Amino acid sequence: MSKGVFWKKIACVFVMAGILIGSAGSVIAKEPEYQWKFGQTSVRASQGESYKLFCELIEKYSDGRISVEFFPDNQLGTLDEIFHAVQVGDVEMCGVAPYVNLVPGGMFNWMPWTVESWEECKMAFSRPSGVLYVPMQKAMNEVGMHILFTVSQGSYGIGNNVRPIKTTEDFKNLKMRVSSSLGCVRGLQNMAAGTGMTVQTVPWGDLYNALSRGVVDGCWSMWPSLVEERHYEVMKFYTSLDWMWDANQVVINNDIWNELPEDLKAAIEKAADEAEAHQYKIQEKMADEFQAFLKKQPNFEIYYPTIEERAEFREKANTLSIWEELCTPWLDKHFPGQNMTKKILDELEANREKVLSSKK
C-alpha cells in the first residue's frame, strides 16, 4: 500500500470520528458546531467566576460541539443593548436583571417578603417547578428568552444614619432612597405607613454621595453593597431584615434553545446546575465574610431582628395587596383560571415553614 493511500484511509477514519488531519499528518480538532457569545454588563468578580465556569462546562459537557466566549463589563453594550441583542439572536446568552421595562413579568424577582433565606431562594427558583421559576420562565419566554439558571447575591436589609430600625415606628420622618422596583417601594411604604417617612428616587451609582451629603437618610442595601460599594462608610445603622432577595437570571435566546437537539440541551442544563451551585456557594461564603468584616467596623452597627420582630414588618407590609396590584393581572393573563397569586404565596409560605422547621 502506498503512503498516499494509507494516509487517505487514516484521514477517513479520523473524519468519521470527528477529527481533521493536517497536511503534514498532524491531528487538528474539529471546529465547534456552535460558537456563541455570553454578554454581561458590569459584574462582580465572584459572579464572573461562575459565568466563566458555565461557559467552560458547556464546552466540556457538549464534547466541544458548543463553544461560548464570555464578554463581561459592557464589552457588548449596556444592559438594554445586550438584552435586545439576545432577543434577536445576535448574542446568544446573557445575564439579565429583568426590570419590567424589559420583561413585563419580571417583577417576581423583587417582590417584598417572598424569600428570606438562601434555602428558600434555592427552592423558589429551582428548575423546572420552583414557585418563582415557573412565572419567571413564562415571563422570559414572553420576551423571547429561556432561563438557564438564577444568580443571587442574597438578602436586602435597611440602613440609615439616624437610628437603629427595630420596629416599624423607627421609620419616623426618615428620608429613604428607593429605586424604580415598584413592589419594593410599595412594601417599604406600607411598613412605614403613618410614620412620616418619605421616599426619594436616587440612581444606584449616586447613592454613596447622597448618603454622605444627607440628601437621603438611608436606603435598602445588601452585604456585598455594604462592603464592596462602601455603603458602611456613609451609614451608621443597618437592620438585617431579609425582606427582599436579590435574583437575576442567565438566559438564552428562546429560538436558539428550542432548535437545539435534546442531548445538547441536557449538556447545557448540566452546566447550568453546576454553575448555579457554584455561585450559591460563593455568595453564601462571602455574605458570612462581609458580616464578619462589618462587625469589626467601629462606627457601624448591625441589628438582627428576632423572628417575632421580623413578622411585624412582614405583616405591616401587606404583601397581598402589592401582589394583587402588580402581579395578579399578569398572572391571570398568562395562567388563566389558576388563581396563581394564591398558589405562589401559599407555596412560598410552605417553603418558609419547611426551612424554619428544619432549624428547630
Image: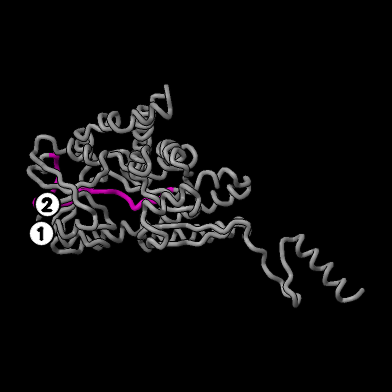
* Colour scheme in use: one colour
In the figure, 256 relative to 329: above or below? below
Disc 2 packing (10 Å; few <14; some 14–19; many ≥20): many
Residue 237 painted magenta: no
The N terminus appears in which quarter of the rendering?
A: bottom right
Check the image and name the residue furthest to the right: 1
Check the image and name the residue furthest to the top: 337
Which residue is nearer to you in this view: 252 or 297?
A: 252
Residue 76: give x, y in percent of width and height: 42, 60
Report the residue marked by disc 1. 213
The CA distance from mark 1 to mark 2 is 9 Å
Task: Determine whether label 1 and label 2 are within 8 Å by CB.
Answer: no
Residue 116: give x, y in percent of width and height: 31, 43
Mark 1 lies on a secondary structure that is loop
User: Total label count?
Assistant: 2
Which residue is nearer to you in this view: 30 or 45?
A: 30
The C terminus appears in which quarter of the rendering?
A: top left
Mark 2 lies on a secondary structure that is loop
The residue sitting at 38% across, 61% down in the picture is 74
Report the residue marked by disc 2. 217
Q: Residue 210 occupies which quadrant of the picture?
A: bottom left
The residue sitting at 38% across, 30% down in the picture is 331
Residue 11: give x, y in percent of width and height: 79, 67
Q: Nearer the viewer, mark 1 or mark 2?
A: 1
> What segment is highlighted magenta in the picture?
150-168
Residue 246: give x, y in percent of width and height: 32, 48
Left or right: where 267 falls relative to 192: right
Q: Amino acid at mark 1?
A: Arg
Q: Residue 353 occupies which quadrant of the picture?
A: top left
Q: Amino acid at mark 2?
A: Asp
